[in-house]
Amino acid sequence: MKKLPIFTLGVEEEYQIIDPDTKDLKSHLSKIVDAAKILLHDQVKSEMHQSVVEVGTNICKNIHEVEKEIKFLRSKIVDLANDQNLIVGASGTHPFADWQDQLITDDPRYHNIIDELQDAARSNLIFGMHCHVGIENREIGLQLMNQVCSFLPHIFALSTNSPFWQGRKTGYKSYRTKIFDKFPRTGLPEYFDCLNSYDDFLDTLVKTNCIDNPKKIWWDLRLHPFYDTIEFRICDMSLTVQETMCIVSVIQAVVAKLYKMNQNNMNFNIYRLALIKENKFRAARYGIDGLMVDFGLRKEVEIKVLILELLDFIDDVVDELGSREHINYVHEILKNGTGAAKQIAVWENTKDMKEVVNFITTEFTKGL
């Protein structure tokens, strides 16, 4: 049987920088990023808000290399934050921070975005995890992007970790995605019949001054305009390293499985974008605890059941990818809840948002 290609991985995580006394987000005035660049070079960068630090792995050949790098990056940012008497947390939103209190990073790129998008950009105080999967052939990458969309709500549901916004329990397991919806060119990607059509779409946006470069396509999933990767952008920032590794492993396995099917001339059914949006909403609202729609059967099914079906679907590529141990952690998430459910449990037990912050900062360092 023909071996799978190496589906390289690159993972980006966005961390919250927090005052240990107030438990609020704290602008670090680039001190952490500047210090980190000496050690980590281009693996760390500032984000629009000064209370955010983004890290990224190098290109990794497998999930084990990703795990090693994420543990290293989390540890270094924790150490550098401690040097500034600050702590680090992981959640798609901060439980009670007010975006109006947050300083903007002094960078022309962010000034330009705010000039264009105004309060939609200023209020975009959110934290995500992005995963790149290497695909050398961009035409195949585009076809995989079209097919992967059906699975995005399942992956997203596992990652939900932002139930609070500005001191309120929102009723969503991922409110982060609702905040980001205010940006243009977000959400699920359109269907493109060929690579030329996709590239022509990007070229049209640039030539008409809708965007100044193709990276300003902020979809939940995109064929990257500059790298030979498919980039998954839908996930909330994960509480723990284990959760990140689990979700990244599922993402890689879904891409590998669909690639394998395509190589064997087996087509995966592509559903209308409007239908997939229905499942994305359900994932944002309920996480793994509600119902999604099986469009093949045309009926509602428990999200947990659909996720187990997804595990069955990818099972034949998992061992070749070497990710079974990480994939199996899905069962722990299904049993114990996503980050959002755990945050809500802390809130319901304590009625104290500061205790929720204590929880997300403690979870951040688990397993390091």
Image: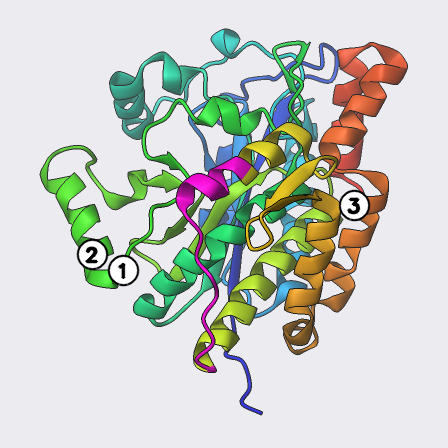
Q: Is residue 281 above or below residue 316?
A: above
Q: Is residue 275 above or below residue 226?
A: above
Of tags 1 and 3, the one toward the viewer is 1
Q: Are marks 2 and 1 in contact (CB under 8 Å)?
A: yes
Measuring 55% from the left and 65% from the top, which residue is drawn there?
60
Q: Secondary structure at mark 2?
A: helix
Alpha carbon distance from label 2 to label 1: 7 Å
In the drawing, what numbered circle is on residue 193?
A: 1
The part of the chain drawn in magenta is: 264-278
Measuring 81% from the left and 53% from the top, which residue is drawn there?
331
Give the left or right position of residue 45, taking residue 157 as reference. left
Q: Is residue 361 visible?
A: no
Residue type marked 3: Ile
Q: Are marks 3 and 2 in contact (CB under 8 Å)?
A: no
- The quadrant holding residue 282 is top right
Measuring 34% from the left and 61% from the top, which residue is drawn there?
142
Q: Which residue is mark 3?
A: 333
